[in-house]
Image: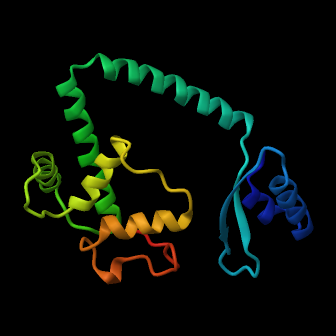
Amino acid sequence: MKYLHKIFNEKSRTVFDQEYKMRLNSPTVTKLGLKIKPQDQPNEYELYYLPTNEIIHLITEIFETVQILNYTFYKLPRIARAQFIKQCIIEELYHTNDLEGVKSSREEIARSAKEIELKTKRKRRFNSMITSYMQLLNNEVSLPESVNDIRTIYDLITDGEIEDKDKPDGEIFRLEETCP
């Protein structure tokens, strides 16, 4: 299946509109409830996901790999599994912070994680982020069901962590694409 943006650039507007409508009305489409307005374009377009045979094949490969990883993970001693999860959280937060322009170190995040693990009263940076990850891992919170839920979670975990000027400037997301 040809990428829609290529059809937009290579074909007429009529061909593009027909292809977009056909895909959007496909019986296997998943509409995401989000709209985009391409730069220098008058129209908004609803975002969707349309699985192709290639995507289904890749999903199958991912599922098979996850099965192997789960088997290997659960063969590890409990202490090693806990350390592995903690290290994954530290790496995830470090790279997310870097992407968002938040200055941090792996060591600082690890210290905060240790404080939370020990249930100390001391409030450290990244407490809300680390706590949120742990709650998700322990099935103590539900996954977001709407884009507003995603923004609410974002605001919760970044509260006091980033400056106002670095927060998304749109109603839910950033108005403009930013590159670090």
In percent of width and height, residue 116 lies at 15, 51
* Quadrant where the C terminus is found in the figure: bottom left
Does residue 180 show up? Answer: no
Using the image as rendered, state which of residue 5 and residue 114 is in the foreground: 114
* Quadrant where the N terminus is found in the figure: top right
Residue at 12% x, 52% y is: 107
In percent of width and height, residue 177 lies at 50, 72
Residue at 47% x, 22% y is: 67
- Is the residue 175 above or below the residue 72 in the image? below
Residue at 24% x, 28% y is: 81
Residue at 26% x, 53% y is: 131
Which quarter of the picture shows residue 86?
top left
In percent of width and height, residue 88 lies at 28, 41
Q: Give the left or right position of residue 99, taking residue 4 as reference.
A: left
In percent of width and height, residue 66 lies at 46, 27
Using the image as rendered, state which of residue 151 and residue 12 is in the foreground: 151
Using the image as rendered, state which of residue 71 and residue 175 is in the foreground: 71
- Is the residue 172 above or below the residue 83 in the image? below
- Which residue in the rendered view is the most extreme toward the front? 140
Does residue 156 show up? Answer: yes
